[in-house]
Amino acid sequence: MLAALASAAVADLEPVTCRDLGAAGDSDDVDVAEVTDTQGRRWIVRAPRTASAAAVLEQERRLLTALADRLPFAVPRMAGTAELPDGGRAGVHPALEGTALDPASLAPGPGLAAALGRALAAVHDLPTTLAEEAELPVYGAAEYRRRRLAELDRAAATGHVPAGLLARWERALEEAGAWRFTPCLVHGDLAAENVLVEDAEVVAVLGWGQARVADPADDLARLVAGAPEEAAESLLEAYDHHRRTAPDRDLLRRARLGGELAVARWLLHGVTTGEEAVVADAVSMLDDLEAAVDGATW
């Protein structure tokens, strides 16, 4: 089905092979496949399963159109779309080259860690009007902190968050001064598979469906959590040097907190979907996290 949609979306695309990518980099409500055509070209086709997923893909397409030639790395460029019988559209773009980032292998210094800092600075320096025009969510600092507090309340209500972690996170979120940041356009989902690298450079960034105007710490959270400490310092140094607007002093603290709160979101996902295996995994991760941060200030 996805190969047929790709053929319908792009006039000279004649599929030869089609490889199911499941929901790689997307929500479970989006089907994704890689199609190779008779000319040896590789294409990515994505089709929404629900109306909400279709709306997110439309927002993402509008943003990607606006991002054309504004960034020092490649982003998906739509080659065509095909209408779906139940509403919404499948989108097709050329597959981008590069290898998925491995944060744990980052080394300190002027190499890939610094390149990540430069790439992130370029994203965060984009005009926030791009997000507004694409009808993406736009949050102020105070509103975003309230959302985090509400998220913490939901996680606490599950009864699965250890008391020590809960107290730590409450202290962090109640420190209003640490949340006085300047909102900017953030990617919102910098999972390793969404960042493609080559020769110590960032060559492409995928998965813009969670982009929004929010806390710049959101994009640093996964990178800081996954990278060795000295490499993270190189990343942040390059980011600070290349941002047109100086980062706020609590950026790193919120980024580290964001990495911790990601485990709470994983727990909430398992509870919401009723996936007991996910809940059990999240509970184990929370226990390990509590032991790791025991006695440390956030």
Image: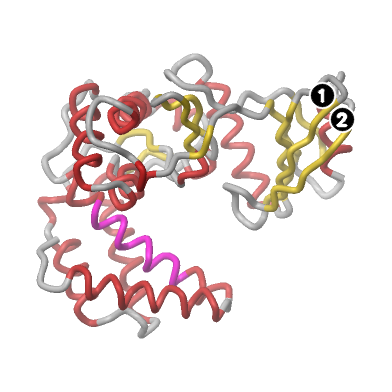
Q: Considering the numbered disc 2 on the image, is that residue within a helix, a strand or a loop?
A: helix
Q: Where are the magenta residues, as a range?
A: 256-268
CB within 8 Å, label 2 to label 1: yes
Label 2 sits on residue: 7
Q: Considering the numbered disc 1 on the image, is that residue within a helix, a strand or a loop?
A: loop
Residue located at (11% from left, 41% from top): 249
Residue located at (45% from left, 16% from top): 70
Residue type indicated by callout 2? Ser
Per the rendering, the mark at residue 140 is: none
Reply above or below: 290 against 76. Answer: below
Count neighbours of disc 2 (C-alpha within 10 A) and say few if under 14, some if 14 to 19, many if 20 or more: many
Image-quadrant location for residue 123: top left
Residue at the top extreme of this rendering? 69
Estimate the x, y position of residue 171 in percent, counting from the top left.
Answer: 14, 67
- From mark 2 to mark 1, how far is it between C-alphas? 6 Å
Label 1 sits on residue: 10
Reply above or below: 127 against 227. Answer: above
Quadrant of the image containing the C terminus: bottom left
Judge by depth and name the residue closer to the eye, 286 or 227. 227
Residue type indicated by callout 1? Val
Residue located at (54% from left, 26% from top): 75
Estimate the x, y position of residue 17 in percent, counting from the top left.
Answer: 85, 37
Reply above or below: 103 against 131. Answer: below
